[in-house]
């Protein structure tokens, strides 16, 4: 029978103790990091290590699994015009309008919301992927889910609009190019004053 060398048993015990301490120390360290304010929480703070990579991987995996594959509306001028109206009312404050400056809301967000109508935007994304984002929102980005506030048709209209943003009719491009009207407070007073 082959026996263990005396120092092998000590090494095994040390390994097991170290492993158990690691299993306890790492979660406690992470708890301490978050509970005592070590994690960045302000929109101007730098992201945590691996935050973007991990969030992006999780988002893409869920979208790939859950996004609708069939678009139930036509990509015609009427759908684009309706989508442009939905976009102006619900999306432009964060994602902007073509050739317009970013709004104060968009400048204060982290991560910075992408300009969906300038440059590439999401024109290379399938409409079903954009629909999933509009319907569900994206955690920890400021992107709300519109499932409770927009109809299914409206969510599809804006999704098809964005998927075809590089090929929109002139009339739709013109409606999107108009600046947003300044916000008016519910009482009708100056929106800058409380």
Image (cartoon, helix red, strand yellow):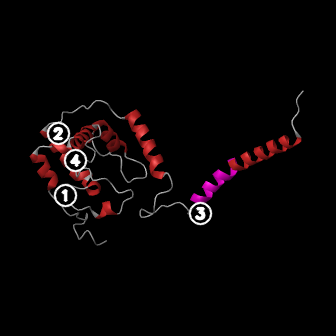
Q: Residue 79 — which label?
A: 2
Instruction: Please report whichever mark, 2 or 1, sits nearer to the chain's N-terminal start.
Output: 2
Asked if the residues shown at circle 2 and circle 1 are in contact, with their CB atoms under 8 angstroms apart, the answer is no
Residue pictured at 18% horizontal, 48% vertical: 85
Q: Secondary structure at mark 4?
A: helix
As measured in the structure, the alpha-carbon distance from the residue carrying label 2 to the one carrying label 1 is 23 Å
As measured in the structure, the alpha-carbon distance from the residue carrying label 1 to the one carrying label 3 is 43 Å
Q: Secondary structure at mark 3?
A: loop
Q: Residue 128 — which label?
A: none
Q: Position of residue 3 (x, y in %)?
A: 88, 33
As measured in the structure, the alpha-carbon distance from the residue carrying label 2 to the one carrying label 4 is 11 Å
Q: Secondary structure at mark 1?
A: loop
As measured in the structure, the alpha-carbon distance from the residue carrying label 4 to the one carrying label 1 is 19 Å
Let me know if residue 139 appears in the view: yes
Residue pictured at 33% horizontal, 42% vertical: 135
**Corner quadrant of residue 57:** top left
Indicate which label's residue lies in the foreground, 1 or 3. 1
As measured in the structure, the alpha-carbon distance from the residue carrying label 4 to the one carrying label 3 is 42 Å
* Residue where numbered disc 1 is placed: 99
């Amino acid at each position: 029978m082959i026996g263990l060398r005396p120092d092998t048993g000590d090494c095994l015990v040390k390994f097991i103790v170290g492993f158990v301490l690691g299993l306890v120390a790492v979660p406690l360290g992470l708890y301490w990091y978050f509970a005592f304010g070590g994690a960045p929480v302000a929109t101007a703070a730098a992201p945590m290590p691996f935050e973007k990579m991990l969030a992006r991987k999780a988002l893409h995996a869920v979208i790939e699994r859950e996004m609708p594959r069939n678009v139930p509306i036509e990509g015609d001028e009427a759908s684009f015009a309706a989508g442009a109206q939905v976009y102006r009312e619900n999306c432009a404050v964060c994602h902007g309008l073509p050739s317009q400056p970013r709004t104060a809301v968009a400048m204060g967000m982290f991560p910075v919301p992408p300009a969906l109508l300038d440059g590439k935007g999401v024109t290379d994304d399938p409409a079903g992927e954009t629909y999933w984002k509009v319907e569900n929102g994206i955690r920890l980005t400021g992107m709300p889910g519109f499932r409770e506030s927009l109809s299914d048709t409206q969510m599809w209209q804006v999704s098809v609009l964005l998927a075809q943003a590089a090929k929109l009719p002139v009339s739709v491009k013109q409606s999107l190019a108009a600046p947003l009207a300044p916000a008016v407070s519910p009482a009708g007073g100056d929106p800058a004053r409380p």
